[in-house]
Image (cartoon, rainbow, N blue to C red):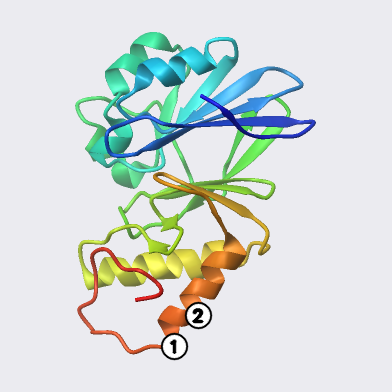
Amino acid sequence: MPVHFENDTVRIHKTVASPYDNNAYIIVCKATNKSLIIDIPKDAVTVLAEAKDTDVVSVAITHGHGDHIEGYAEFRAGLTAPFGLHKDDADRLLPHVSEFYLEDGATIEVGELSLKLMHTPGHTPGGVCLLLGKHLFSGDTLFPGGPGKTQTPEALKQVITSITERLFVLPDDTNVYPGHGSDTTIGASKAEYAVFTSRDHAADLSGDVLWRN
């Protein structure tokens, strides 16, 4: 798993960890070697191998869709750290049980690092993003080009509200690391969204929506 970003305080690893191009992330506090794993897709072997020389203190699941939790048994067998997701997606983890909940406005401490939790529903009821300085781990809430897939027009409106009211207030140079695919920035996403709002759309719009279409 290559180093995706590094400075004096943090090292971020990113790997494609499933046949569905799921990204898994490891955030490492360089001062303490403590780490956080974000999402547990199918390829647990690769992710756990990269994390094995760090002290994993917790695992955060951005939402409860199957491709983001598919590796649960393997990750659980390889770690003693607690696993958490938002309570509104807790039923998606059954028969397993979340050991803590990712609550809006709370923080996850990883050594000397502190990640802020942001509840961003729409793609799923319990979708969350995690913010570390100018690094946003967006799960399937926001991708380059648009939001995560939604099942209903109401869900699309909800995820757009999550994005515009919670994420677009961040600095334009905030890096966005999504649950699949390539990175983007808040500034680039805002410019794409401006194209979307300049056009008329069907009242029943949902599904895979691209800002520029």
Q: Residue at x 36, y 20 (%)?
A: 44
| Residue identifier under label 1 | 198
Considering every residue shown, the one lying at the far right of the view is 8
Which disc is residue 194 wearing?
A: 2
The image shows residue 156, relative to residue 24, as above or below, that is: below
Can see residue 168? no
The image shows residue 205, relative to residue 129, as above or below, that is: below
- Residue 185 is left or right of residue 42, and the answer is right
Quadrant for residue 29, please give it. top right
Count of marks, rendered view: 2
- Residue 155 is left or right of residue 139, and the answer is left
Q: Secondary structure at mark 2?
A: helix
For the residues marked 1 and 2, what is the alpha-carbon distance in whole angstroms?
Answer: 6 Å
Q: Secondary structure at mark 1?
A: loop
- Check contact, mark 1 vs mark 2: CB within 8 A: yes
Between residues 34 and 17, which one lies in front from this camera angle? 17
The location of residue 106, given as percent across then percent down, is 57, 43
- Quadrant in which the C terminus is drawn: bottom left
Going by the numbered disc 2, the residue's amino acid type is Ala
